[in-house]
Image: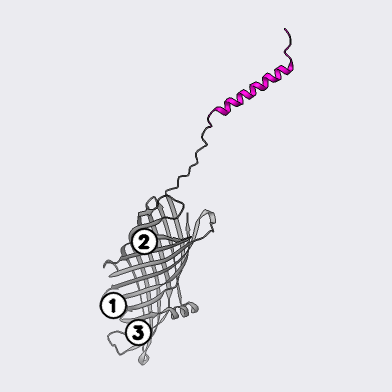
Amino acid sequence: MKAIPRAALAVALLLTIVTAATDAAAQPLAPPAAHDDAVSPWRFQAAAYAWFPELQGKVSTSDETASIDVGFDEMFDLLGNGDLFASGGHFEVGYDRFSFFLDAFGGTARPTSDVTLGPRQGLTGTADLTMNFVFFEFGPAYRVLEWPLDGPGRPISIDVLAGGRLMYFYQSISLRGDEGVGRDASSTSEWVDPFVGGRFSVPLVGDLDVVFRGDIGGFGAGSQLAWNLIGGFQYHLAWAPLGARTSLAMIYKALDFEYQSGSGPDAVVTNLNERGPALGLVFDF
C-alpha cells in the first residue's frame, strides 16, 4: 500500500473538525441557568426617633391637682435646660401579608405648674412637676391592600392593626404654696389599653412617601379613652448599610388619654395630650 500523503491527512482532519463544529452550531442552545429572582416573603423594619412634644392637661396625686401647659416655646426652654427629653423606637417583622410590631415611646418632663391643694380652692401655689412616661405598643397587622403588586416603583399599602398599649406614668408634685405651705406627693400608674386602627403609605414623587397611622383605644379597660395619630413624610435615601434600605422619617405624633384610678383624696388622675414633631431613621431589610 502506498502511504497516504501528510497533506491529505491534514485536509481530512480539517474537514472533520469543520463538520463537527457545524453540527454543534446547528443544535439548539441549552437555556441559561435560571436565576432565583423570587422576593422573600419575610421583611424586617427597625427605626429610631427623637420626639419633641408639647404637653397639655392635668394630673392629680394625693389631693393635689397640677395643670400642665407646655407650649412650643416653653418646650424648647425645657429642652435647653435638660428638663425635657423624649424618644422612641419601632421594630416590625412581617411574613407575606401578616406582621407583628413593637413600638416604644418614652421620656421625662420637669415643668413648673400652678397647683390647687385639695378642696380648699383658695390655696394655690407653684409646683415643680416631674413626669416620667413610657408607652409600649405591641400587636399584629394585616395588609389589606398593596397596589400594584409588581413594578419597579413602591406600592400603595394599607394595613389594619390591633393590639395593646402598656402605659407607665410616674408623677411627682413638689408644692410651695401660699401661707408657707409645702407638700410633696408622688404616684406611679401602670395600665394596658387595647386599641384598633390602621395605617397607610402612599408614594408621592421621586423618593418621597406620605405615611399615616391612627388608632383609638382604652374603652374603659385602662384609659377611659385614648387616641394616637402619626402622620408625615418618609424620604428614601441612597445609603444602604449592610444591605438595608434606609429612609428619613419626618412625622408629627399626637397621643391623648384620660386615666383615673381610685377615688376621693386618694384618686390618681392623668389627663394628658402630648403632641409634637419627631425625626427618625428607618431601616428596612
Which residue is tagged 1?
266
Q: Residue at x 72, y 13 (%)?
A: 4
Residue 121: x %, y % from top left: 29, 88
Q: Amino acid at mark 2?
A: Arg
Task: Give left or right: position of 272 versus 23.
Answer: left
Of the image marks 2 and 1, the number of the one nearer the N terminus = 2
The disc placed on residue 199 is: 2
Q: Is residue 193 above or below residue 31?
A: below
Q: Are marks 2 and 3 in contact (CB under 8 Å)?
A: no
In this view, the mark in front (2 or 1):
2
* Most common SS among magenta residues: helix
Q: Nearer the viewer, residue 65 or 98?
A: 98
In this view, the mark in front (1 or 3):
3
Give, as a single range, the part of the protein colored magenta.
Answer: 1-29
Decide: few, some or many residues near mark 3? Use Cα within 10 Å; few <14, some 14-19, many ≥20: many
Quadrant, the N terminus: top right
Which residue is tagged 3?
115
Give yes or no for residue 6 being in the magenta stretch: yes
Q: Quadrant of residue 276?
A: bottom left
